[in-house]
Image (cartoon, rainbow, N blue to C red):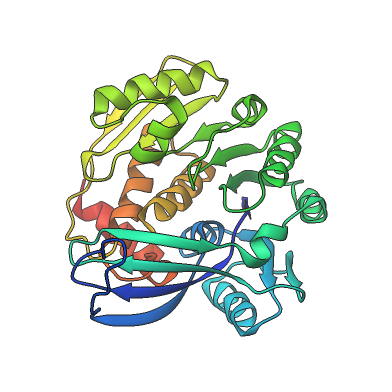
Amino acid sequence: MTLLVFGSINMDLVAQTPRLPAPAETIIGHQFFTAPGGKGANQAVAAARLNTPVKMIGRVGGDGFGAELRQNLDAAGVDTSAIFTDTGVSSGVAIIAVDDNAENNIILVPGANGRVDQSDVNRLAEHLPGAQALLLQLEVPLDATIAAARLAREQDVTVILDPAPAQNLPPELYRLVSIITPNEVEAAQLVGFAVNTPDDAFKAADILLDRGVQTAVVKMGAQGVVFANRSGERGFIPAFEVLAVDTVAAGDAFNGGLAVALIEGHPLPEALRRGAAVGALSATKPGAQPSMPGRAEFDQFLRNHT
């Protein structure tokens, strides 16, 4: 029942502000803190906190952040034995501004994540036997991500791709993906039109299916989740109502929760509902990995929302 995560490991440098600054504007913030992040590491922690065995494949730099990032993953229960320390470069960092409405903007400096290559894919290959799912994102070089997806599909491992940061994807990658999970902004970039409503999301999902993915999921925040698959199954999962404090890692939490639910054998609609629950819980706390709920909190939340 192992989950593999191939992707980015960052240190988040977070400034909380009353509003997001305009270009060339200086504003005064409320608070600053650092927190471990990176879309790959966030998803790994989200799954590990739900008591699923998780192994992370990626890179950190040979700096203080790198050591701290590895320690944080270890503490969350993630197997870090396949993480490479690249002494020739800094660890990846994300510089994040979060406003009083829980909206954010992010500057990503890849660092060691930008040097993920075939050697990291080879490490992934060693751990694919016995794995049930592989979580991917787009914060490491695309060639490595495609190679990882190809290896996983060859071994019938479910490939879940979070296409973020948004970019145009080559046709081959769509065909290798079991489940693609863009949010509304990422979906719009992939399909070329605005995705503002569930109807828009269904149209976007159909286009993604036509490109070769097996299942398309569009995460729409407070509007809920739309999904469609090649078997003709389609549906809408309403969002959970929570008081959002920081949505920076809600999408990552969703993907971690989704992967765990699928590994546990839940059908797709219920797996998506569980992913949405993990995402909603993460939005109620500041930070990325620190916001991920534990299993007891998650189970209680589901009991309260049956």
Does the image show residue 15?
A: yes
Residue 258 lies left or right of residue 91; in this view the side is: left
Q: Residue at x 57, y 72 (%)?
A: 73
The image shows residue 155, relative to residue 96, as above or below, that is above
The image shows residue 43, relative to residue 11, as above or below, that is above
Residue closer to the observer: 305 or 198:
198
Q: Residue at x 68, y 61 (%)?
A: 58
Residue closer to the observer: 63 or 274:
63
Residue 189: x, y in percent?
A: 43, 34
Question: Would you identify the image quadrant in which residue 193 lies?
Answer: top left
Q: Residue at x 44, y 54 (%)?
A: 252
Residue 184 lies left or right of residue 79; in this view the side is: left
Residue 175: x, y in percent?
A: 63, 25
Number of marks in the image?
0
Residue 3: x, y in percent?
A: 61, 52
- For this orientation, the residue located farthest to the bottom is 64
